Image (cartoon, rainbow, N blue to C red):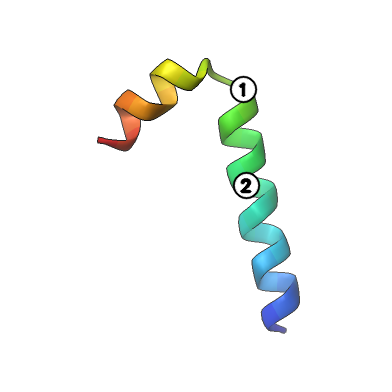
Amino acid sequence: SPVNRVDNAYGDRNLICTCPPMSEYEEAAE
């Protein structure tokens, strides 16, 4: 379902954002 899909995406983003420093995450995004 769309809700579950969004929840999974949010969980993945939260995990990625909280694991490494924000500076590294921003550099990796580029």
Query: What's the residue type where badge 1 is placed?
Result: Cys
The residue that disc 2 covers is 12
Image vertical order of residue 4 relative to residue 10, above or below? below
Q: Secondary structure at mark 2?
A: helix
Q: Position of residue 5 (x, y in %)?
A: 66, 71
Q: At x 40% / y 18%, what residue is drawn?
A: 24
Left/right of residue 20 with respect to residue 6 in the rendered view: left
Q: Position of residue 25 (x, y in %)?
A: 43, 26
Q: Most extreme residue toward the left, as rendered?
A: 30
Q: State which quarter of the image contains the C terminus.
A: top left
Image vertical order of residue 20 relative to residue 16, above or below? above
Q: State which quarter of the image contains the N terminus.
A: bottom right
Query: What's the residue type where badge 2 is placed?
Result: Asp
Left/right of residue 27 with respect to residue 11 in the rendered view: left
Q: Secondary structure at mark 1?
A: loop
The residue that disc 1 covers is 19
Q: Nearer the viewer, residue 1 or 27?
A: 27
- Which mark is first along the chain, 1 or 2? 2
